Image (spheres, coloured by chain):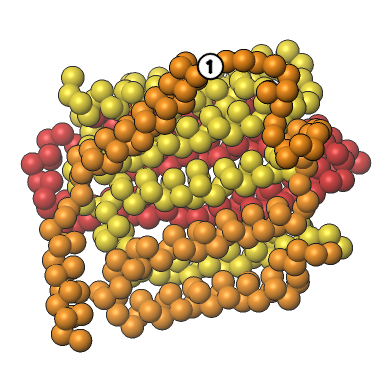
Chain colours: A orange, B yellow, C red
Amino acid sequence: MQLINALLQANTTAVATATGTAADYFPIGIQLLFAIGFVAVMIGGSHLLGPKRRTADKLENFTSGIESHGTARQPMAIKYFLVAILFVLFDVEVIFFYPYAVNFRDLGWQGFGEVLLFVSFFLIGFIYIIKKGALIWED
Amino acid sequence: MSITEILFWFLSVLTLVSAIMVLISKNPVHSVLWLIATFFAISGHYILLNAQFLAIVNLIVYAGAIMVLFLFVIMLMNLDVAIEPKRSMWMKFAGVISGGLLLAVLLSVVRTSVDLTNKTAQLNTGDIGLIKNLGHTLFTQYAVPFEVSSILFLSAMVGAVVIGKKN
Amino acid sequence: MPIQYYIALSATLFCIGIVGVLTRRNAIVIFMCIELMLNAVNLLLVAFSKMQPVAAATNTAARNAANVGIDGQIFVFFIMVVAAAEVSVGLAIIVMMYRNTHSVDVNFLNRLKN
């Protein structure tokens, strides 16, 4: 128990000293640059260095010997779409939890009550979705 | 020219170019991809202004969720082949002219306004954009709008299910 | 950075969105242009939240302690959240429109007049 307490204390002090400026993003920028550069170099290198023999058979997509027909962009069923919409809404719900998690201790029971009310509204919506059968895959 | 200014001009050019590309690409899928580029550039602006939380939220909500939804809808409708009927040349011309006139009016106001002289937007400093400060204000001062937004989401959920579900 | 640059940038972005709404007929692209306009406003609000006169640049610490301008960023946060709800319902409507008319051309909606 004391260990956990000590850990929590150490954590808060570490957070408190880390004031953020845009300069703190420099390592992230380097990492991003490195990631993009690595992918670009690999793709470009294999494109440039690799041998190219373009016959009709080689350019065909590999589908385990079955002849492919049509494109990959088939119209999808409408139920995927409802799932995507509901994903966006619950995604935004999660966004609200980040600032709450950072301020969890300062806000105390009052903040907990607010978030509980917030989540309960979403829960009502979720129960409605389940009852309506919007997430059922089979027709 | 400091590195911050270089970044500002680079991000501004990126924002405007990708916004224009959203307009002029024929294929809706390309429009979505250019719009994602615009959102990334705007997130870069937020980071420059030290609004870090908003930068991340912009990426997660807009680039991560909303644009995926747009791509879903485009694939759902098989719109990747450009079947959009052309508006008449005259209508396009009128649209561009009216948008340009509005821009000219706005820019001239900004250029001549006395209230705006000697005002700067602070780059790279300030704590108000950090998640801790924003969260504290959100859950104390703005608790009621926070709860109201959950009711809005409840209604959006019900609306999407009612509109989107067959029968 | 002078605030005029940010205002000019967002005004240009907003006008690009307006031109898109006026010139395109694909409902989805029109919707994307509306998102563009929303983002232009967001950018402007964030820039305003960090605005201060040059002369007062010395009391930055005091302004930070008082959280001056935090309302602007909270407002942007709520705009983003509301935009998510708006997009979900709007795209559901567009999908219904496509299902009934097999087109996303906004001119089809003319028949709502009769």
The residue at 46%/63% (across/down) is A94
Residue A4 placement, left or right of A117:
left
In the rendered image, the quadrant that contains the C terminus of chain A is bottom right
The extreme bottom residue here reads A1
Residue C41 placement, left or right of B23:
left
Residue B111 picture location, percent across and down:
34, 21
Residue B71 picture location, percent across and down:
64, 41
Quarter-of-image position of residue B116: top left
Mark 1 falls on what kind of element? loop
The residue nearer to you, when weighing A15 against C51, is A15
User: Is C38 drawn above or below residue B31 in the view shown?
Assistant: below
The extreme left residue here reads C58
Q: On what subunit does the disc labeled 1 rest?
A: A
Q: Classify mark 1: residues with Cα within 10 Å, few (<14), some (14-19) or many (20+).
A: few
Quarter-of-image position of residue A122: bottom right
Residue A111 picture location, percent across and down:
36, 76
Q: How many marks?
A: 1
Observer able to see residue B124: no
The residue at 58%/64% (across/down) is B153
User: Is B99 drawn above or below residue A33 in the view shown?
Assistant: above
Residue B9 picture location, percent across and down:
32, 23
Quarter-of-image position of residue B110: top left
Observer able to see residue B23: yes
The residue at 75%/27% (across/down) is B81
What's under tag 1, amino acid-wise?
Answer: Pro
The residue at 73%/23% (across/down) is A57
In the rendered image, the quadrant that contains the N terminus of chain A is bottom left
The residue nearer to you, when weighing B98 against B165, is B165
Residue A105 placement, left or right of A121:
left
Q: Label 1 belongs to which residue?
A: A51
User: Is B28 drawn above or below residue A14 in the view shown?
Assistant: above
